Image (cartoon, rainbow, N blue to C red):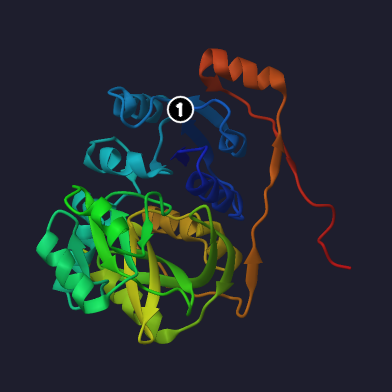
Amino acid sequence: MNILVTGAGSLVGHGILRSLRNIEQQDFKIITADPDHRAAGHWLGDHGVTIPLAKENGFISSLQEIIAQHKVDIVFVGTDPELMKVSESELTAIKVVSSPEVIAIGEDKWLTVEFLRQHGFPFPDSALSENRESVHRLLEKYGFPLFAKPRIGARSVGVMKIQGQEELQHFLGQPNYIIQEYLSGEDGEFTAGTMTYDKTCYSSIIFQRDLKDGNTYRAYLYKNLEHEKIITQVSEKLDGVYGPLNFQYRLKNGKPVIFEINSRFSGTTPLRMAAGVNEIEMALEFFKRGKISKRTTVMSDIAILRTWSDIVVPMEQLNEFKERGVLTRPSGKYFPFKGNLQK
């Protein structure tokens, strides 16, 4: 089997590659793709290729060339900007990507709120920033603070906690923003990952998390059947899901309120692997067999503290890759901790 992983330089791409390398039977070849020849993930694969950015015209044609040349069977997508382009394309390989409709709901926070509201799930009360009347209603109901968020964005970029009228006025009338009730993080913030095919959710794994620069850097496995049930129901209600979904939520009156849906694998994918659920292996199982077994964690009551890790690569390879755009035999060396950290 030949596997293409895009976004080899992204946190999500690294998670996909690490999960692939954790599969016991390595009966596949991994081709990595990224616009940057210095993307560390290239040295986690077997063959690297530089490609255009997703916003450039040659992006899809370059993927198709790779698929044809390497007889790629299945494609994993590692960055948000690539999702819609790949979903809408007619690549001659199986794409582990949901439908454009699902991706649109996940990309646009207003569409996320509307989907949750229309299907009876808890949602953050929200108003479009250009709708002054709706924003005023929100302020009358909740008072300050409020949240201002870009309708389309990730990793908390552009998110602001509004403390008063002066800050609120800055966003009123601005397009492409939403104003939301403030969901306190006193009870924690949570990230959940699911794998869903044909409207059946096969895993629902939740972590309570600590954030740094918009990414999870400490995670605590969180077992809550009520929360898992809601996350599962949302996954199965979204029409057109093929594989992974990632949810971010906080609590309101003890109930999970989802404020973000990502229709892709997440940066916490390898953390769920560490807890016993390898979502990438599940995707390969569905690809091979057309069916899949349900998964649950084999560990409980654990914390995962994330660290930097290093890959040492020969400068000769780096320079040749830059010049040719192809890395034929990556031979980087992973630089791990000594021993198993046990005293």
Q: The C terminus appears in which quarter of the rendering?
A: bottom right
* Any part of residue 108 in sight: no
What amino acid is labelled 1 in the image? Pro
Residue 3 image position (x, y, % from top left)? 46, 40
Residue 297 image position (x, y, % from top left)? 54, 74
Classify residue 64 as left or right of residue 116.
right
Would you name the residue on which mark 1 appears? 35
Residue at 25 percent across and 73 percent down: it is 123
* Image label count: 1
Residue 127 image position (x, y, % from top left)? 18, 63
Residue at 38 percent across and 86 percent down: it is 254
**Towards the viewer: 153 or 181:** 181
Q: Quadrant of residue 262?
A: bottom left
Judge whether 244 appears above or below 342 on screen.
Answer: above
Residue at 36 percent across and 45 percent down: it is 80
Classify residue 69 as left or right of residue 326.
left
Classify residue 83 as left or right of residue 307.
left
- Asked which secondary structure carries label 1, the reply is loop
Residue 179 image position (x, y, % from top left)? 25, 61
Q: Residue furthest front?
A: 166
Classify residue 299 as left or right of residue 102.
right
How many other residues sit within 10 Å of disc 1, few (<14), some (14-19) or many (≥20)? Answer: some
Q: Residue furthest right?
A: 343
**Towards the viewer: 55 or 264:** 55
Residue at 58 percent across and 73 percent down: it is 220
* Any part of residue 11 in sight: yes
Judge whether 131 appears above or below 136 on screen.
Answer: above
Q: Quadrant of residue 225?
A: bottom left
Judge whether 18 appears above or below 243 on screen.
Answer: above
**Towards the viewer: 207 or 187:** 187
